Amino acid sequence: MKKRYIELHLHLDGAITPDIAKDLAALQKIKLPYKDERELEKALMVSKDCRSLNEFLECFKLPCSLLQTKEGIARAVYLVQENIKRQGVVYAEIRFAPQLHMDKGLTMREVIESALDGLKKSDLKCNLILCCMRMADNKEQNLETVKLAKEYLINEESNKDYGVVALDLAGAEALYKTEQFIDVFKLATELNVPFTIHAGEADGAESVKKAVQFGAKRIGHGVRSVENLALMKALSEKKICLEMCPTSNLQTKAIEKIEDFPIREFMKLGIPVTINTDDMAICGTDMGHEMNLIRNKFDITDNEESEIYANAVRYSFAKNKIKKQLMEVQ
């Protein structure tokens, strides 16, 4: 039987494969400055000698340049959904930062509505997460993202099953500390908008601790939580889910080698973990590869793999009726 996967941590701009890039370029009449497929692939994928998260983030320039029009954004969301559906993904939460898609004059509202238009074109069960960004001078844009997330948010009372379901904070974690963004998540809490936060990837356990204090329902990555036993116990007690991304963590040097990936330590303490690709195209991976990697390296049993799937259902931001459907197809 074909494996089924749930992807909770997937960046739209990090999922633009060469085929999708060529499609988006043709649609928007953009000439790609690459002479062949190999050059294009090299521009879209992280190098094998990547030294840090900041270097990793450089790979987003090309895909982001293709996501600056209504048509491009809608088409990209649809194509990414279709791509991951072929790989066995039955539910996904795709995240993106509206403020990064305004170079050609779109408003944040137009960016979000374009992504929602794309979402409706595929039959894959899928929702959107809006990212705030770690930058020095974009506080107002982040606060606007929070307000728009509230405006477009779906919940149990909504008549729509799919749409915007949460917020995130992404970007250069070590340069812009989690604690600097307290106002963003104070507003999100006031507006009752659920959120996940990238933490414990390029920065240490203190970053995760701050995310927990802010009220994050999930943590993006969180691998460096292993540095603090008290924090790990808190994650377990509060049942805060970790969106773990093994290949990405290797490439950004959040871990030095796969044997350092702390999934066993987290599972032993009862911390809910999920497995994700992070940036499928940039990392050169998919959900099947990620699950095979941890299964082989950490002797993950069939029952444990089923529990990882169940965690993804339980801690997704999907409506309860969608969660019920996802449990039934496991």
Image (cartoon, grey):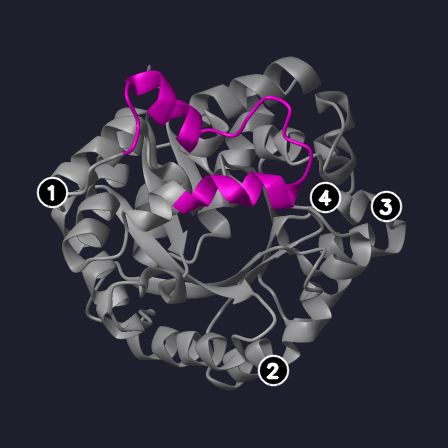
Q: Amino acid at mark 3?
A: Glu
Left or right of 127: which side holds 169? Answer: right
Sequence-wise first label, 1 or 2: 1
**Element type at mark 4:** loop
Please tell me which residue lies in front, 4 or 99.
99
Specify few, some or many for label 4: CA neighbours under 10 Å numbering under 14, 14-19, or 20 or more.
Answer: some
Check if mark 4's residue and mark 2's residue have beta carbons within 8 Å.
no
Tell me the amino acid under the disc marked 1: Leu
Determine the CA span between mark 2 and mark 3: 27 Å
Which disc number belongs to residue 183? Answer: 2
In the rendered structure, which segment of residues is drawn in magenta? 33-61
Residue kind at label 4, given as amino acid type: Gly
Q: Which residue is mark 1?
A: 27
Q: Is residue 49 magenta?
A: yes
Q: Nearer the viewer, mark 2 or mark 3?
A: 2
Mark 2: amino acid: Asp
Query: How far apart are the two marked residues, 4 and 2, measured between alpha carbons?
Result: 31 Å
Marks 4, 2: nearer the viewer: 2
